[in-house]
Image (spheres, rainbow, N blue to C red):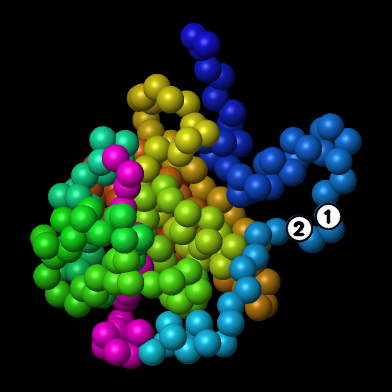
Amino acid sequence: MTDWTPNPDVLLAHSHDTDRYLALLETAGSQRPAGARLSLCLSEADRHMAHWLLALHRIDLTLPWLVLHPGVSDEKSGYSARYVAEAAQTLIREHGYQLILTGSAAERSFADAVAQHLTGRVVNLTGQLALGPLTALLAEAPLLLTSNRGPVHMAAALQTPVVVMAVDATTVPTPLPQPLPVATDVPSSSHTRHTVRQSLPPGVPLQRLVDAVLALVTSQKSVVC
């Protein structure tokens, strides 16, 4: 293949990947289930575990905090540990953020490389959380800052705002003059939060990444950088 035609709905999307796949199946004659959307069930035990972890590590819920899931399979495919640490430290130093680092045991070395550059209220739980407690923690979090990994989709199902630090696999694989984000809106209701996913390709200035986090937390609306 020599040429790519960008799909505007991918470059600036208003639906999750799953919704676009369902729409594709509809063109082949399949019927979309009524009210279909991503969802995750949380047990009371997992909810209690998340609350216990927040209390144990003295996360002040009246102050800004977020979950940082920085791990990547290959640093060349995303942001460097030093870049992630600089963005995170800016949030800590200038905006008073408390950070909880998460990830699998395989991502521990990358998370540790990030954590060693951080000062302030930083809790590194990488490799320590089972799926249930991690899900419950993401459900409680005001925002998830992450590489393009599984927690992106978990947060979408939980309607937790996300800033993604990676190239989206469905976007144009060649550099764009002005990098475009991928933002996914899930309509809110009286019982749910308004969810946004914003994807920022590598090479984005550090301040723009910080601004994306602040914009989603304060507005909880789609932000185009």
Where residue 85 sits, quadrant-wise, is bottom left
Q: Look at the image and give the residue range highlighted in magenta.
A: 53-74
Q: Where 5 sits versus 81, above or below?
A: above
Residue bearing the label numbered 2: 36
Q: What amino acid is labelled 1 in the image? A: Pro
Tell which of 68 and 97 is nearer to you: 68
Residue at point 43%, 36% (across, down): 180
Which percent across, then down, holds residue 96? 22, 74
- Let me know if residue 73 is in the magenta part: yes
Q: Is residue 141 left or right of residue 187?
A: left
Q: What amino acid is labelled 2 in the image? A: Ala
The secondary element bearing badge 1 is classed as: loop
The quarter of the image holding the C terminus is top left
- Let me know if residue 143 is in the magenta part: no
User: Is residue 164 visible from the viewing direction of this image?
Assistant: yes
Which percent across, then down, holds residue 76? 26, 35
Tell which of 205 and 141 is nearer to you: 141
Where residue 159 sits, quadrant-wise, is bottom right
